[in-house]
Image: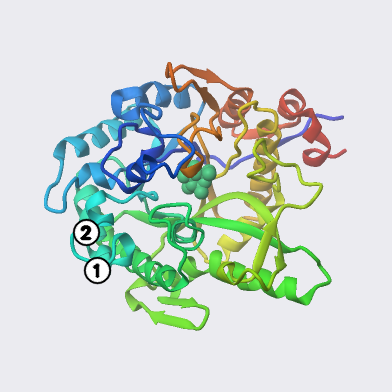
Amino acid sequence: MAKAKIQFPRGFLWGTATASHQVEGNNKNNNWHAWEEAGKTADKSGLACDWWGGRWREDLDRALETGQNAHRFSVEWSRIQPEKNRWDEGALNRYRDILRGLRERNMTAMVTLHHFTNPLWLENPSTDSGGGWENDETPQLFADFVRKTVSALKEYTNLWVTINEPNVYVYSAYVEGAFPPGKQDLNIAFKVMVNLVRGHALAYKAIHEIQREARVGMAHHYRAMSPKNTKSPLDHWVVKAQSSVFNDLFPNAARNGKVKFLWKKVEIPEAADTQDFMGVNYYSRDQVAFNLKMAGELFGKHSFPKDADLSETGFIANEPEGLHEAIRWANGFGKDIIVTENGVEDAADEMRPRYLAEHIAQLWRAVNFSWRVKGYFHWSLVDNFEWERGWTQRFGLWELDIETQKRKKRKSAELYEEICKTNSLSSKMVEKYCPEAMEKIFPD
Ligand code: BGC
């Protein structure tokens, strides 16, 4: 076939995303460490990718050498504020080092202020008022932490994510129970949602007070959903109901200051218009069937289609059109859009090249619709600690040997390098790295 190429706009951000607990190692003062020690995870995070020991330098060199011009990482609240009444300036200095490292490499930095982990003092307070985000004091405590952190780091970035995937956090920690504190209680889940919205709103205001040019958003996990049986009105209903809670609740609250969940409604006027951009994390699409027995999951049973292109551990179905849908959805909020995560677990790197190429093609379709997409961060740079799934899932462009800390470049890293360096995806690249995707991406 003739050669074809899809080209991205000048200045497009190309990067990878990471999170403190997943890469730093020796993070011992947060709720996830306790969760690991209690045997609730497949493995322990241990040294992780040893970023706290300084290996962020070599990994950012890898990112730079392979054409990435941006990186998203998170700061660890429990390091910066190890006790309620103590700040660790040394920890802030380490994050300043990383940010300086990004500046030296001429890479744009995006900093996430909360990525799933809470300091132990916050998660297990000495009072019995409930821990973590169940506690009504937490939004203000988060805002104090944000104020301290942003004041210390503002010289190096103006791109902030307040909270990563508040919907996944609430679902996993308070509905499914796989994240600490492992509860399954919709009433508590609602309380946590309200406090997360309050925390975000206070953080948004605090950041803008400190830095006028700040760009602040959340990273929203968008799960595409479709009815399992397209002829079933109940399946259609449950998709709508679930999507309005899982996908829409947080961005709506940050738009209009209202948290609506089932029959409950809370007004948080100070949360209205508190996003400068929409961060979108997209991984997969589910089929949903109405199921009366699943009240705790709001009556929806999720699965992947029988003929789905499934990832190594069956965690993700390769559904690239879902990314296009996610961006169309994000565009409805009228703000700039940044894809803050997208990726797949694949130690063998058999599926990732086509997953990557097919998602980049959908990203380009969105850009081509003139939707305001400004960048793409792949999850992730190097294999890292996958929460309750431990080291059983490998999302890195680079493979990590956790015993020796050696990194090995996967084929997908080479493909991503060509994409980043040319700001494009070409039929030649697809032919070289994932010929099986040719027909889908560049049909004759
Ligand atoms: C999270 C990441 C995680 C990734 C893959 C996202 O929901 O933000 O921390 O590693 O999914 O599971």
Q: Amino acid at mark 1?
A: Ser
Work out whether 253 lies above or below 28. below
Percent position of residue 291, x then y: 69, 70
Q: Identify the residue at image location x=46%, y=55%.
A: 165
Neighbor class of circle 2 (other Cα within 10 Å; few <14, some 14-19, many 20+) is some
Image quarter of the C terminus: top right
| Residue identifier under label 2 | 125
Image quarter of the N terminus: top right
Tag 2–tag 1 contact (CB < 8 Å):
yes
| Residue identifier under label 1 | 129
Work out whether 19 lies above or below 348. below
Which residue appears farthest toward the front when viewing the image? Answer: 39
Q: Secondary structure at mark 2?
A: loop
Q: Amino acid at mark 2?
A: Pro
Q: Is mark 1 within 8 Å of ligand 1?
A: no
Answer with left or right where residue 69 lies relative to residue 317: left
- Dividing the picture into quadrants, the one containing residue 228 is bottom right
Answer with left or right where residue 407 lies relative to residue 1: left
Percent position of residue 182, x then y: 43, 56
Q: Is mark 2 within 8 Å of ligand 1?
A: no
Q: Report whether residue 384 is seen.
A: yes
